Amino acid sequence: MKNKGSIFMLPKMVVLDLDGTTLNNKKELEPALAHYLQKLRQSGVLVCVATGRTMLEMNLSLDAHFQWDGIINSNGMSVTLEGEEISRHSIHPYTVEKLIEASLARDIHHEIHHHDGSTTAKISPLRDRAHELTVHGYFRPKWTEEIVTDNVEKILFFKSEVDEIAMWMTELVELEKILAFNAAISAPDLIDISGKLITKATGTNEILDRVGLEFFDIIAFGDGGNDLPLFKKAGRSVAMQNAPDWVKSQATEVTKYTNDEQGLLIHLQEIYGELTN
């Protein structure tokens, strides 16, 4: 772990990853944590979510009545503050086309997520091999003859063979030098693609500018590679106990418990107290 920053000033804003952090392994938000986060907001602390999910994907796991101060979707590609979208970025059509073509040549599954909430995927032999997937599966895409490149919010690449995903990530790092995109491993079998230089950190910065805070005012929680740009900026960064060691090593703190053991709630309580009625 990195050396801890000062713990004497309570963070004014909490930024939370969803999968593997705020949600348990059933992709649910535990009622006790939901209640605590709302009490935290009532105490004056801003509570934001920074996720690789689109808004539609996020809403599938969260109660529509749950309130966030800010939402950073698709690793910074869309940012909402107090219910108003304040920024939106799209991946360049040429980049989308070249990445999908390259992935299909390497038998890597893909989904293209668009700003209107739709999901597309180019028809290929991989469509008939979805049964090979053990964790991540297709999110009801519209299968198309041609690659749909308009208004792309993010691209997902996935495959059950994690060694092949790791090799694909190595290739993507090289492709980043010539194409306008950013790649991040969010799970061993899953890679998120966002726009060039767009990350959870850039999305968070857009909210900070609006509310008059700085990065040293926040505490960020996460468990994956797409959280690292924010970890590098945040005053305090917390990796979940279930995060891989290479993520934990870049955080200032690590929770005592996993996302399936109320690790986030317990860590927040250690910082802010019980916040009882």
Image: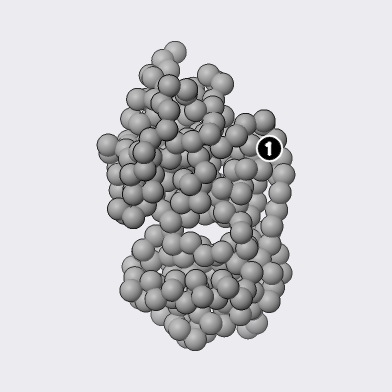
**Residue at the front extreme?**
3
Q: Quadrant of the N terminus?
A: top left
The quarter of the displayed image where residue 66 is located: top right
Residue 106, percent from left and from top:
45, 83
The residue type indicated by label 1 comes to: Asp
Name the foreground residue: 83 vs 196: 196
Q: Quadrant of the C terminus?
A: top left
The residue at 61%/47% (across/down) is 203
| 52 vs 95: above or below | above
The residue at 56%/37% (across/down) is 215
The residue at 50%/79% (across/down) is 103
Name the foreground residue: 72 vs 208: 208
Residue that numbered label 1 is attached to: 209
Q: Can the viewer see residue 51?
A: no
Check disc 1: other Cα within 10 Å, few if <14, some if 14-19, many if 20+.
few
Residue 114, percent from left and from top:
65, 63
